[in-house]
Each structure stands twice: as structure tokens, then as C-alpha cells.
Amino acid sequence: MKKIEIFTDGACSGNPGPGGYGVILRYKGNSKELWGGDPSTTNNRMELTAVITALSALKEPCEVELYSDSKYIIDAVTKGWAKKWRANNWVKSDKKKALNSDLWEKLLDLLEVHKVNFNWVKGHAGHPENERCDELAVMGSKKFSRS
């Protein structure tokens, strides 16, 4: 399996509001940037969209080191919450509906294809790739802003 590094971030101006995502894919020293946005979304949706976009860009099953500043994603995956939500028909342990189930479904499906190790990085703390992903995400949120 190819070993890939992925860095992701999401941003939103207002929550909900116009949002964007940024991704850096790195393989053998070569990098590719992806970004996009949505005119009406939330920060968590953009964080999820970044990870889904990154994993969807891989053309074959890969071993991935994924870096994100989203505790929402890191915890939901590494602590098994997202799988439990799906098993319980998208109802959380507190009996509330799990948000963003459409995106979680896509992500969980992708995690069955790729071997992904999730790594949390502190946002806005000078991590070069996280800072660049943030720039891409902000660019996406501005491009897709309705104003």
C-alpha cells in the first residue's frame, strides 16, 4: 500500500454561514492542494468534507497518516463514536440525533477502504501544513460566500 500524508482543515464564517475546506495530500515529497466551499454550512461539515475530499482523491487503497485540528472528527473516529452512531441508526448515547450523518456515512465507508491513522494537531499554532490548509479553507469560504 502507498503511504500518504494528508492534512485537512475546515472554516466557516458564521456557524452556519459560508464555509470552506482545505487539503494537502503528500506522497513521496510531492504535494497536491485541494479546496472548496459551500455558501451555507457549518464548521463541522467543512471539517468532515475536507477529510472526505482527501480520502476520495486517493485512487487505490492507501496507508494514510491524517492530520486534523478537529477534535470532533478525531474523537468520533478514534473513540468509536461514529460507528456506534451508525449502528444505532444515527442516534447518540444521549438519545439525540447525530448531526451530519450523511457525511459520517461517507467517511466511515472510506475508512473501510483505506488504513487511516488520525493525528490531532493544535489549530492556529504554527503547524505549517495546518496553517496552509486553514488559508485554503478561508479562501474557499470567501469564494462561496453569497455576499
Image (tube, rainbow, N blue to C red):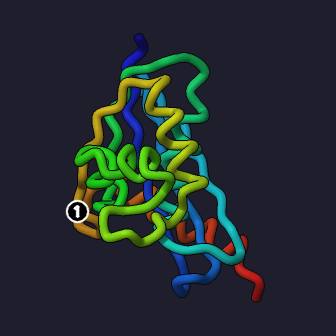
Residue pointed to by mark 1: 122
Q: Quadrant of the N terminus?
A: top left
Residue at x 50%, y 43% (from the top left corner): 107
In this view, the residue farthest toward the right is 146
Q: Secondary structure at mark 1?
A: loop
Residue 45's place in the image compared with 2, above or below, is below
Residue 74's place in the image compared with 96, above or below, is above
**Closest to the observer, 138 or 56:** 56
How far from the left and from the top, in percent, is residue 9?
Answer: 44, 58
The answer to whether residue 105 is left or right of residue 93 is right
* Residue 125 falls in image quadrant: bottom left
In this view, the residue farthest toward the top is 1
Residue at x 59%, y 35% (from the top left corner): 56
The answer to whether residue 47 is left or right of residue 122 is right
Q: How many marks?
A: 1
Q: Quadrant of the C terminus?
A: bottom right
**Closest to the observer, 20 or 108:** 108
Residue 105's place in the image compared with 15, above or below, is above
Residue at x 54%, y 74% (from the top left corner): 42
Amino acid type at image mark 1: Lys
